[in-house]
Amino acid sequence: MNLLAAEEATNPLIPNVAEMVVGGFAFLVVLFFVGRLLVPRIQKTLADRVDAIEGGLKRASDAQEEAQRALQQYKDQLAEARHEASRLREEAREQGAQIKAELREEAQAEARRLVEAAHAQIEADRQQAFAQLRNEIGRLSVDLATRIVGESLEDEARRRRTVDRFLEELESSNAAVR
């Protein structure tokens, strides 16, 4: 029985009251130190991490919004640049057509000027040829008249009158034939 009584007294399933008091006191001391020292540090670290994560998310969100704005601005600038390029191409076409028309007008004016100059030169050459021919006809007429009449037409005034009279008769007969 002693053994039974000793077994009952040392039952491992029933804790010893002194151990429970010491264990409870130790638990409360550890709980106090953990609650007062470690928990605030852990909470501060967690709060810092939460702030860092939320701040990172906020910065990422801001960066994404900024990227969206930059993309929209780029698209707007690209559309504006395309519109400007289109306008410049159209303006260049118009200027090209205008320059082409001006060059055509200048070429036509130059052609008219050249034709008029050629006509004037031809007229001057014709007048010069006519004057030379008239002088030559006068000389030949005087020689012929001298031979026919047999008298000398050496006198310049007489010779001129004779030539002028002959040419006038020739021109009047020429005008009558036309």
Image (spheres, rainbow, N blue to C red):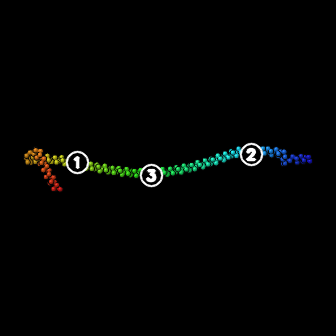
Mark 3, residue position = 87
**Dot 2, crowdedness within 10 Å: few (<14), some or many (≥20)?**
few
Q: Earlier in the sequence, mark 1 or mark 2?
A: 2
> Given the current orientation, which residue lies at the most extreme front position?
36
Of callouts 3 and 1, the N-terminal one = 3
Please tell me whether mark 3 or mark 2 is closer to you in this view: 2
Please state which amino acid type lies under the numbered disc 2: Gly
Q: Residue furthest right?
A: 1
Of badges 1 and 2, the one in the foreground is 2
- Identified by mark 3, the residue type is Arg
Residue 73 visible to an observer of this rendering: yes
Residue corresponding to mark 1: 124
Image side of residue 132 versus residue 50, left or right:
left
Q: Which residue is mark 2?
A: 35
For label 3, count other residues whose C-alpha is less than 10 Å away and answer few (under 14), some (14-19) or many (20+).
Answer: few
Mark 1 to mark 2: distance in Å?
127 Å
Task: Answer with mark 3 or mark 2, whichever residue precedes in sequence.
Answer: 2
Secondary structure at numbered mark 1: helix
The label number, if any, that marks residue 92 in the structure image: none
User: Residue at the location (20% across, 48% down)?
Assistant: 127
Residue 37 pos. (x, y %): 73, 43
Q: Which residue is located at x 80 percent, y 46 percent?
A: 24
Report, in whole angstroms, how far the alpha carbon at label 3 lies from the one at label 1: 54 Å
Residue at the extreme left? 150
Q: Name the spot of residue 101 as percent of width and height, x first.
A: 36, 52
Looking at numbered disc 1 in the image, what kind of residue is underneath it? Ala
Q: CA distance from mark 3 to mark 2?
A: 75 Å
Q: Are marks 3 and 1 in contact (CB under 8 Å)?
A: no
Write the residue at 39% across / 50% down: 95
Name the side, left or right, on which 50 lies relative to 2. Answer: left
